[in-house]
Amino acid sequence: MLYQLYEAQRSLMEPFADLAQATAKAFNNPLSPLAHLPHAQRMAAGYALLHRLGKDYEKPEFGIRTVDVDGVQVAIHERVEVDKPFCELRRFKRFSDDPATLARLKTQPVVLIVAPLSGHYATLLRDTVRTMLKDHKVYITDWKNARMVPLSEGEFHLDDYVNYVQEFIRHLQQEYGNCHVMSVCQPTVPVLAAISLMASRGETTPLSTIMMGGPIDARKSPTAVNNLAMTKSHSWFEHNVIYRVPSNYPGAGRKVYPGFLQHAGFVAMNPEHHAQSHYDYFEHLIKGDDASAEAHRQFYDEYNAVLDMDADYYLETIRTVFQDYSLVHGTWDVKNAQGELERVRPQDIRTTALLSVEGELDDISGSGQTRAVHDLCSGVPASRQRHYEAEGAGHYGIFSGRRWRERVYPEVRAFILDHNTPVKAGSRKNARSTV
């Protein structure tokens, strides 16, 4: 019922938000009589803010048209390589008329970026993708909004997530021989599971994996996000945050954790910050500070765009990662595409180089949670393991913004280049359990 009430409220608000936008334009237009009234700029700013508070935020575009590669503008063509019921494998293909640049592009490493399925769309990693495109062939997992997936497409579990990742890795291996895998936040756990299972089967594993700000071991330095998941029972989540998709969407009847509830949780973590940010936007509009106002719009166009998560996947993630700690306890069994259970054994990974990245001020995945991956991957030689902590960086700072571009990315780029050559599995004499 809550989802239906939200949809009714959203439908009622939509015309008022549109009216607020039209009124703001009327007060701003120099040809309009309203623009010459006293305090017209303030009125325009107020209505513009009202519009943004009431509007519906749809999935943003990546919008990456070109990137600069050593001073040459390279065109980007975005396309879907693999289309699964709950995810698209999206490629950013690069084109250039400059022969030297084109030759360089063809030899650069292939990277699969596994985006989070935790509320926001994969476009949250737009800056990550744009930066990586300078030196890599880039693919990304673009997870679909569960309310848009018909029930006829079946269920989606955490096991399916792991299987998707393996399928995408194999697709790139077939195309290029091998690839590197970068996981940001939530997917660090299923990505580690996917690579572990491939190693246990004797399959070729990725050349390297970069794990950034994820809850590998959520027991370490628990944050507010961890505490919520750890203090509430599984049944509490099932009864308080799970609802069925209303009839006006293709996924009608599917049980989901609705995006609007997730968004409310995001805002509740720091309401004063968001309130101040919206007031600052109002002030920027009054002062005519277009650059600051546009920066606000760009951020909240992304931040406010949320998707529904399939209930099975969400509840299983809560239990596996934040309540049972199945990965670190060595008790996690994943059902493969053939319906067989396989035990996740990170210690079986031998040839995949491992880089973990944490932000010093990360309030989503606490200190040590990602670094814990090195204790689990004891079969990887010490020479192929590295940990990097980004000083002064919060959670978003390790994959977006100035600190990502200037500090984290050079470390990631160098690590990928250092481990871009396949190696054979060797002895375990140089393996270590800590780093």
Image (tube, helix red, strand yellow):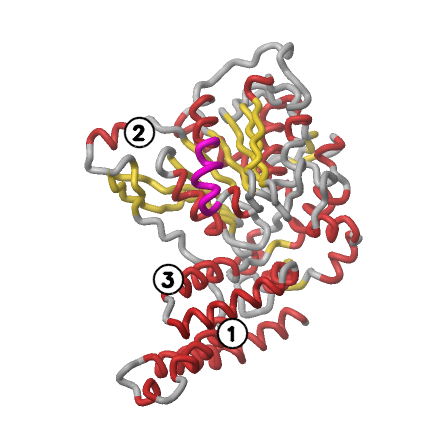
Residue corresponding to mark 1: 54
Q: In the image, residue 342 lies at what x, y percent?
A: 68, 30
User: What amino acid is at disc 2?
Assistant: Lys
User: What amino acid is at disc 1?
Assistant: Gly
Q: Residues within 10 Å of mark 1 (few under 14, many from 20)?
A: some
Residue 65 is one of the magenta-drawn residues: no
Q: Could you tell me which residue is drawn at 47 percent across and 80 percent down?
A: 15
Residue 15 vs residue 5: left or right? Answer: left
Q: Which of pointers 2 and 1 indicates the residue nearer the eye?
A: 1
- Cα–Cα span, label 2 and label 3: 37 Å
Residue 406 is one of the magenta-drawn residues: yes
Q: Could you tell me which residue is drawn at 47 percent across and 32 percent down?
A: 412
Q: Which of pointers 2 and 3 indicates the residue nearer the eye?
A: 3
Magenta span = 400-411
Residue corresponding to mark 3: 291
Q: Is residue 62 above or below residue 366?
A: below
Where residue 222 sits, quadrant-wise, is: top right
Residue corresponding to mark 2: 106
Q: Could you tell me which residue is drawn at 40 percent across and 52 percent down?
A: 62
Q: Is residue 422 above or below residue 232?
A: above
Of label 2 and label 1, which has the lower sequence position?
1
Q: In the image, residue 192 lies at what x, y percent?
A: 61, 33
Q: Is residue 37 above or below residue 394?
A: below
User: What amino acid is at disc 3?
Assistant: Ala
- From the image, give the main secondary structure of the stretch colored magenta: helix
